[in-house]
């Protein structure tokens, strides 16, 4: 009964079924995220109380199946098979139950500790779908609970089911006798005969929590990769009796497989049987079939799949109306003539809202944070802190951190919720659909468009998001090219330069619209650059054919704005801000040292000395030494690049306020800036090394210094070449 101290609950389900909402409804804020050991797939673990018992919930990666070999499927399968959870909750979408039950049936074949959570019952009601969950429970042989997690309906019933299931599982070890005898799916006779022949051999080799019937099915499917994974796990977990039995296992199972003589298409037969069983189960829930007993006999073996599928969908007038509405929206958002223009328009609108909305909060936050500097300095003075150390801490470390927070937080606090609203609305998969052919033609994957979109908020988030790409080759391409998406740290400088040189004569409101339009053009240029570089990588270092991917188009849903704001703040905004602050603090110390330590006969600061050294290269690129040293010192955080340029031109020893647009314009022009300089600066902002946070993330995701170095050098080389070309063309035109 020791396990009663804490239940372990695994949460499984397809993508887009509300699994994360169920997880958050149960665990609230008591959760933490990380990575699965040895994997780049993110894990989430949360805790909740269930009738006085502490429960640990593990959110497994969303997956459509346990039978393929992606990291997500491997993680979900291994956890269910070998981590011995007290309960597995499989979340299904009530509006498309048949498709979701495929995964549920696969899990039921592995373990009997399963609860089917039919989520989105409120949406099913809107569709006119009336589900009989009691009949579905009888049909599947496991508890079934209906929930509407977004409104917390049914969550208490789910807790009760979890408690009952986990309490029973804690009283026994391994699979129940009932589960061993019961068959979640009835297969055609040739498969069932093979299972009967192989199972005795399997039971001699495997003990513990893995269903011998399920392993026999994997053998009949000739899925040796899964079998090898199981063998490896069982060895490490000591579920196989002794070393001798481990060594004999392959020979014994190979002999059993020869004896069974499965048909060549056994794998297809098994998958088709699961589909039919899922269809029959959904039909029972929809009340469109006969008795449960009849379905137990005919659900898997009947050949009338089409009739079963039609019945399972629970068609109604209301559902047909909503389907038609979704189709009308798709004709607009994914149409050949309308898809891309609407995507660009939405991008422009999101950027305009971000630019217009972030100005005042950013100024206010800057005043508050920089106002605190004098109080901190006064406090340090009171405790007798030396002047030099006080300047180092306040004008160096604190001021850079304050600048990064004030410049970065407001736009992120606007951009990420807007991005999440589009995600909840169901638009982002349509973006991937619209761009898939372009990325595929460049040798990449359509999912890269989603990770590129994440990069607009923060490249570190975009790099992390590349985990959704299954192919290691395509994932590397997406990681290396993600920094071609200008992040929130680069937007302020791009917008300022645009405002100073290209939108300065427009009125205030037109200025923001024009800035958003030009920024959109810059973003399109970044997308084009990523496609070109992806093509280059796919033909050289990362050769290979682009893989196809099946992406589910979720129905259009009304976003829950309140939850979106909270989720985007916790999961994205504060996460990224924390990383940026970690990088900005040591950067502030370095910048202070370079601008205050003086050397040489002319008593120049190290900043000025390095700027002079870099000036010849800067001139070739249409820039100057001050701009280049500012970019180099801005490596920890892109937000401080422009303030560093101002600091270099004003010869001050610390970051200072940028001032009005006119003041900045006069300062830049007096230091040799022209429209060509402005264009080259924008291009180099778009194409240069990623920030320190992103570099650390690339190293973490790839586990390789080589790929991290390539992720730094490749965009920088592109930026240098493009700037030199622009400057050279401008020089020829002037001549």
Image (cartoon, rainbow, N blue to C red):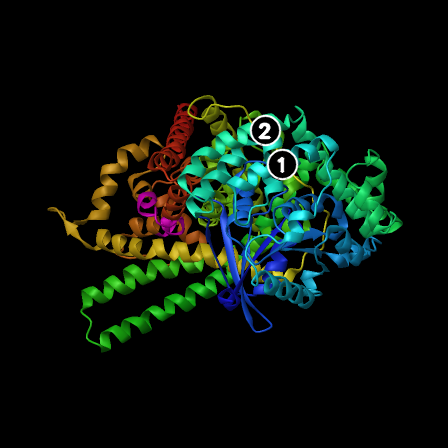
Q: Position of residue 377 (x, y in %)?
A: 28, 71
On the picture, is 370 further left or further right than 26?
left
Which residue is situated farthest in the left direction here? 601
Nearest the eye: 287 or 4: 4
Instruction: Provide the major secondary structure of the magenta segment.
Output: helix
Q: Which residues are magenta?
A: 630-643
Q: Residue furthest top?
A: 539
User: Badge 2 is on which residue?
Assistant: 257
Q: Is residue 735 magenta?
A: no
Residue visible at 32% across and 57% down in the picture: 585
Query: In the figure, 48 relative to 487: above or below?
Result: below
Q: Residue furthest bottom?
A: 382
Could you tell me which residue is drawn at 75 percent across and 55 percent down? Answer: 137
Q: Tell me where residue 4 appears, x and y as whole percent.
A: 53, 67
Return the residue nearer the eye: 454 or 405: 454
725 sits to left or right of 79:
left
Residue drawn at the location 85% of the way across and 54% of the way down: 128
Q: Residues within 10 Å of mark 1 (few under 14, many from 20)?
A: many
Picture quadrant of residue 265: top right
């Amino acid at each position: 009964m020791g396990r009663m101290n804490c239940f372990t609950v695994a949460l499984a389900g397809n993508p887009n079924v509300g699994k994360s909402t169920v997880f958050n409804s149960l665990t609230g804020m008591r959760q933490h995220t990380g990575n699965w050991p040895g994997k780049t797939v993110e894990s989430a673990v949360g805790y909740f109380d269930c009738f006085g018992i502490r429960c640990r919930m593990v959110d497994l990666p969303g997956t459509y199946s346990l039978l393929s070999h992606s990291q997500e499927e491997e993680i979900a399968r291994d956890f269910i098979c070998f981590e011995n959870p007290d309960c597995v909750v499989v979340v299904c979408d009530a509006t498309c139950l048949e498709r979701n039950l495929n995964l549920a049936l696969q899990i039921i074949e592995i373990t009997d500790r399963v609860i089917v959570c039919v989520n989105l019952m409120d949406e099913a009601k809107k569709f006119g779908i009336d589900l009989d969950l009691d009949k579905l429970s009888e049909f599947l042989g496991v508890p079934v609970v209906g929930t509407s997690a977004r409104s917390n309906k049914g969550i208490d019933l789910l807790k009760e089911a979890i408690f009952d299931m986990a309490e029973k599982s804690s009283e026994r070890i391994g699979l129940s006798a009932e589960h061993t005898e019961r068959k979640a799916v009835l297969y055609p006779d040739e498969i069932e005969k093979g299972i009967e022949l192989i199972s005795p051999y399997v039971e001699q080799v495997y003990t513990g929590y893995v269903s011998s019937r399920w392993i026999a099915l994997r053998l009949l499917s000739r899925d040796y990769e899964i079998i090898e994974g199981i063998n490896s796990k069982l060895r490490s977990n000591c579920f196989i009796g002794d070393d001798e039995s481990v060594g004999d296992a392959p020979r014994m199972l190979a002999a059993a497989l020869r004896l069974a003589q499965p048909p060549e298409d056994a794998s297809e037969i098994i998958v088709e049987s699961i589909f039919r069983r899922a269809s029959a189960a959904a039909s029972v829930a929809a009340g469109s079939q006969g008795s449960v007993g009849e379905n137990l006999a005919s659900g898997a073996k009947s050949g009338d799949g089409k009739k079963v599928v039609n019945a399972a969908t629970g068609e109604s007038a209301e559902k047909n109306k909503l389907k038609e509405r979704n189709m009308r929206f798709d004709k607009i958002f994914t149409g050949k003539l309308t898809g891309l223009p609407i995507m660009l328009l939405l991008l422009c609108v999101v950027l305009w809202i971000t630019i217009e909305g972030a100005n005042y909060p950013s100024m206010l936050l800057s005043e508050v944070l920089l106002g605190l500097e004098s109080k901190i300095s006064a406090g340090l003075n009171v405790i007798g802190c030396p002047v030099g150390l006080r300047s180092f801490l306040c004008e160096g470390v604190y001021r850079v951190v304050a600048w990064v927070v004030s410049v970065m937080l407001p736009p992120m606090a606007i951009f990420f919720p807007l991005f999440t609203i589009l995600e909840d609305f169901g638009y982002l998969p349509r973006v991937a659909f619209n761009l898939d052919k372009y990325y595929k033609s460049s040798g990449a994957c359509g999912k890269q468009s989603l990770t590129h979109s994440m990069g607009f908020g923060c490249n570190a988030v975009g790099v992390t998001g590349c985990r959704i790409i299954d192919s290691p080759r395509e994932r590397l391409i997406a990681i290396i090219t993600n920094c071609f998406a200008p992040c929130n740290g680069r937007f302020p400088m791009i917008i300022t330069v645009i405002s100073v040189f290209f939108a300065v004569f427009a009125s205030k409101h037109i200025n923001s619209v024009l800035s958003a339009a030009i920024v959109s053009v810059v973003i399109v240029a970044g997308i084009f650059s990523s496609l070109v570089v992806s093509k280059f990588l796919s033909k050289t270092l990362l050769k290979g054919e682009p893989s196809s991917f099946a992406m589910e188009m979720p129905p259009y849903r009304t976003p829950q704005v309140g939850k979106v704001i909270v989720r985007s703040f916790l999961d994205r905004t504060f996460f990224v801000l924390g990383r940026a602050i970690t990088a900005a603090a040591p950067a502030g110390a370095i910048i202070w040292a370079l601008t205050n330590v003086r050397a040489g006969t002319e008593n120049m600061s190290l900043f000025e000395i390095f700027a002079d050294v870099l000036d010849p290269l800067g001139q070739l690129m249409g820039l100057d030494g001050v701009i280049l040293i500012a970019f180099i010192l801005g490596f920890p955080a892109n937000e401080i690049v422009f303030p560093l340029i101002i600091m270099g031109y004003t010869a001050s020893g610390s970051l200072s306020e940028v001032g009005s647009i006119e003041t900045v314009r006069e300062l830049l022009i007096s230091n040799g800036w022209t429209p060509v300089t402005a264009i080259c600066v924008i291009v180099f902002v778009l194409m240069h090394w990623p920030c320190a946070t992103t570099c650390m993330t690339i190293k973490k995701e790839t586990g390789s210094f080589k790929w991290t170095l390539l992720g730094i050098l490749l965009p920088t080389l592109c930026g240098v070449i493009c700037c030199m070309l622009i400057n050279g063309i401008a020089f020829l035109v002037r001549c």
